[in-house]
Every structure is written in structure tokens, then in C-alpha cells.
Amino acid sequence: MDMWTAVLAAGVVGLLLGGVLGATGARWVARSRSAGLDDDNHLALALAPLSSTLARVERQVGALERDRIDQFARLDEQLTAVQSSGEALRAQTAALAGALRSPNARGAWGEVQLRRVVEHAGMLNRVDFSTQVTGTNADGRQVRPDAVVQLPGGKHVVVDAKAPLAAFLDASQGILDGEDAAFAAERQAGARRQHAAALRQHVDALAAKQYWTAFDPAPELVVCFVPGESFLAAACEADPSLIEHAMARKVVLATPTTLLTMLRTVALTWQQDALAGNARELFDVGRELYRRLGGLGGHVERLGRALHRAVEDYNAMVGSLERRVLVTARRMHDLEVTDDLLPGLAPIESAPRPLTAAELIDRAS
């Protein structure tokens, strides 16, 4: 074999080996691709539930986001409404405070509050209390309280409802725009002190009027009606001796609660007085009835005696008729003048029942 034959044989062998190796590699690649596709299919099948779960979670997250947006929108509307209401309330409060700064408006409001308290206590206007009554005190001055409450026994209690509130309204203001908090607190404390001083001066003015001398008989005091619990509390906080000062000046500081309690007590006193009056009237009626029963006993006793005498007279007449008249009349039958027999007459054996009640017997005797 020459060299070319050997080379050709080697080439053929190489081709054959290459073909074998190529076929083997092709089969291996095909087998590898088939195995990869199987793994992908298994992985896809394993991840399918997770994919559906993720899709459901995504939908829920989307729904929650939409709800969150809606809730924030509604919350924003509510906050806007609350802000509007707060501004309206602030404006109305400012308007009310401005109105109460006027003495006439403040007096009218106090009178309305006083009337509500008095009527809530169960009292009737012009029966248990009177308003705007004019009187003359011991100094000869005319006074005109807001209400005069009637007490049992013809007594009266005078009530005034013109308590000063202007300084309290200043004290109740919050921090103004651009105002320092410490300065606002000091301003409010100063306004409360002014409110206490104004109420103290009003107490002195009421004491000087001597209402109790103008509506005698009346206890030596006048009720100063303060139309709010906070009004008196703020004044007492700034001036702790205010109530003692008022009592020493014969002025009673009364809030709606204390005045209602006082008037309820007066109403109960009226009820007890009415019950006592009814008891006295019942006692008088009982005594009169007892006296008249005694008089009736005398009449019954006389009637009984009259009936007894009538029975005795009747029996005497029957006896006389039997012994004297009928005896002679029966002889006419014996002489055959008449065929009819005269009936006999029986006496009355029962007598009137005598009185046994001691009250009737004593009165009759």
C-alpha cells in the first residue's frame, strides 16, 4: 500500500469516525433538548398555582388601592365639612359674644334664662312668681327686679338677672392670630380678674338697693342670678372670697343649678303648705260634722219620743175603743140589728228603738 492509499484510507476512516461522532452528538443534543422541554413543562405545571395566586393578589391590591383612594376622598370631604362647621360655629360664637356685650341684650338673655329655670321648677307666672314688678325701698327709691318669687305665708324672694359678662367674654377668647401663647394666657387671666371685679361691684350695687324692704315681708336677701355655671366658676377662681363677700352683703349668687334647687324647695314648701291647709280644713270640716251629728241626735231623740207617745196614744185609743165603743156596738148584733161582726183591734206592741251612740245621747241630753 502506497502512501496515498494509506492517506486515503485514513481519510475514509476519519470520515466514518466523524459521521459516527456526528450522529452520536446529534442524538445527544436531541435527547438533551427533549429533557429540557420536559423540565420546562414540569416547572410550568408547578408554577401555575403560584401564578394564579399572584394574579389574584394583584387584583386584590388593585381593589384595595381603589378603596384607599375613595376613602381618602371621603375623608377629605368630611374634613372640609368639619372645617366649614367649625368656622360657622366660630362665627356664630363670635356673633353671640358680640351680642352679649350689649347690656340690653345681655339683660334680655338673662331674663329668658331666668324664666326657663323658674318654669322648669314647676312655677306659674303671676301665680308663683311675677316679673318686672316695681316697688319702693326703705330709702324711697323705686326698684324693679327681674322676678319676685312668692313664698308661703305671703313672703317674697327677689331675683336679679343682670350679671355682668363682658369681661368673661374677653377671658373666653382663645389665642388670636399672631399672638404669643404666654401672652394670651396672661390676657385671659387678667380678663377673669376683671370679670370677678365686675361681679363684685354688681353684688355691692344689688345690696345697696335693699330689695327686701320694697317687697316686705321678705327675707333680707336678694338672689343674683348668674346665667351659667362657668361664669361664676371663673369669677370665683379669680376671686375666691367672692361668695363670702356676697353673703355678707345679703346677696346670694345663684347659677341655674342652684336656683333650680332653691325654687324646687320653694315649690315643695308650697305643696306642704297646701297639704297643711287641706289638713286644717279637713279638721274643721270634721269638727263641724261631729257637731251636726250631735244636733241630728237631738232631733232623732225628739222624734223617737214623739213616736213613743204616738204609740201610747194609739194603744190608749184602742183600749178605749175596745172597752167602750165596740162593746155597745156588738149588742146591736146580739139584738139582730145587723148580721156583720165588728173586727177586733190589736194594740201596737213594738216601740221605737232607743239611741245607744254616746255622741247622740250626750248631744240629745
Image (cartoon, rainbow, N blue to C red):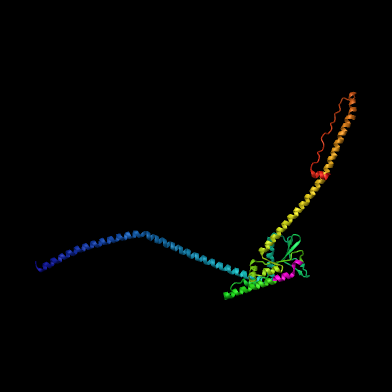
Q: Is residue 110 magenta?
A: no
Residue 185 is left or right of residue 111, and the answer is left
Residue 122 is left or right of residue 82, and the answer is right
Percent coordinates x, y for residue 339 in the rendering: 87, 24
Quarter location, residue 349: top right
Residue 68 is left or right of residue 281, and the answer is left
Residues rendered magenta in the picture:
202-213
Number of numbered tags placed on the structure image: 0
User: The N terminus appears in which quarter of the rendering?
Assistant: bottom left
Q: Residue at x 34, y 60 (%)?
A: 44
Q: Residue at x 79, y 48 (%)?
A: 290
Give the main secondary structure, helix, strand or loop, of the magenta stretch: helix
The correct choice, above or below, for 352 with respect to 115 in the image is: above
Percent coordinates x, y for residue 217 in the rendering: 76, 63
Could one spot residue 116 in this view of the protein? no
Percent coordinates x, y for residue 40 in the rendering: 31, 61
Could one spot residue 42 in this view of the protein? yes
Relative depth, front residue between 14 and 228: 228
Percent coordinates x, y for residue 138 in the rendering: 78, 69
The correct choice, above or below, for 343 with respect to 89 in the image is: above
User: The C terminus appears in which quarter of the rendering?
Assistant: top right
Q: Is residue 207 magenta?
A: yes
The correct choice, above or below, for 273 with respect to 83 in the image is: above
